[in-house]
Amino acid sequence: MLVSLQVGSLIAPAYACGCGAMVVNRNSQVAVDRETSAVGWDGRTEQIVMQLSVRGNAPDAAWIMPVPHRATVELGDAALFSELSAITAPVTEERHYFWPRGKDWPFSGSGNSAGDSAAAPKPGAPVDVVGRERLGPFDVARLAATDPEALESWLKENGFELPDRLATALNPYVEQRWEYVAVRLAPENRGTLSGTLEPLRLRFASDRLVYPMRLSKLAATPQSLGLYVLADHRMEPRDAIGGRPPKVSYAGRVDPAEEPYEALAAVTGDKPVFVTAIDQYFPSPERIDGDHELRATAEDTPYRTVRYRDALLTWGGMPAWLLTLLGGAVLLVALPLFLVVRARRRRPVLPPPPVFTPPPLS
């Protein structure tokens, strides 16, 4: 099972995020400050729990995500993201240095600082609205589209315009006969989109562990992606799909019942899993050439990111370097005195001269 963290700034009228594209009308702007997605796969069914943090002046927006098969949508549990963040967080270790640095006495002071109801299907239509629900702030439509033009028609009917670049980017999914989840984001107070929205949970059939990434090529700025993979073994992407080589920041087996991690246990079925956290950077998003597929590595080698905090070495609360210098000074003074005293003690004592006694007079 996969968990992903995608951070990006996506401003109108249509921009990509990790597993979808955001569309607003021409007179509005919206930014996705953070997208967090938890994705699980049991070999047959994949689920994605997605949470968006948004800001802007748009009264509503449409978020489109391609899925390989018919999807169901419901609200998710935000606690899952807090638990996964805690599991994969780096550990901090202290590393000592001997000689004082700029922040230490006598340079700059003392001390150390650490670094609805569903609509009826319309068979045969270019776009089948196979379901529509109102979930919290979301108006969710599940679509089966046979071509980008059909998807464009649906967007227009709902007040949005499909940009040419997005239509082109959707072509590979149309050719593979994927479907879409189209989410109309609308604030409940009829204001503008702002803040962290409630998470959505999508479920659909899938015969492989895949994270849709093709739409990210529409991004105008470099993209950072974090993938948290929960599976029986340590996992890795098959290739870099146009980004820099993925880097592992955490790998280890976790038992959600021990802490406990209740939200994680609900996803994994209360079973121990191997967690792999993968970070990747895309300096040129236009080079993204596919979706992420993940596979098990040859060995389940554990790993955890360590952040070091440098601290001045002390003995008894005193800087070790100062005690060493003081000790050296004392030694320089005491050693000559010791040698003098020792030399004097070892100097031989001469016997007194013999007493001359004159012979007696006869």
Image (cartoon, rainbow, N blue to C red):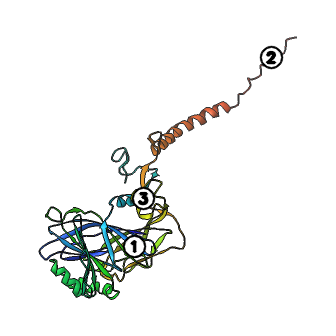
The mark found on residue 171 in the picture is none
Q: Tell me where residue 335 sits by quadrant.
A: top right
Side (left or right) of 322 relative to 110: right
Side (left or right) of 336 relative to 79: right
Q: Is residue 173 visible?
A: yes
Instruction: Look at mark 1 in the image and give the residue it sits on.
Output: 46
The mark found on residue 87 in the picture is 3
Please name the amino acid that badge 2 sits on: Thr
Please name the amino acid that badge 3 sits on: Ile
Disc 3 element:
helix
Side (left or right) of 141 relative to 272: left
- Mark 3 or 1, closer to the camera: 1
Please name the amino acid that badge 1 sits on: Glu
The mark found on residue 357 in the picture is 2
Q: Is residue 162 visible?
A: no
The answer to which of marks 3 and 1 sits earlier in the sequence is: 1
Q: Nearer the viewer, residue 150 or 64?
A: 150
Locate residue 94, reporting x and y percent: 45, 52
Residue 276, compared with residue 154, is above or below; it is above
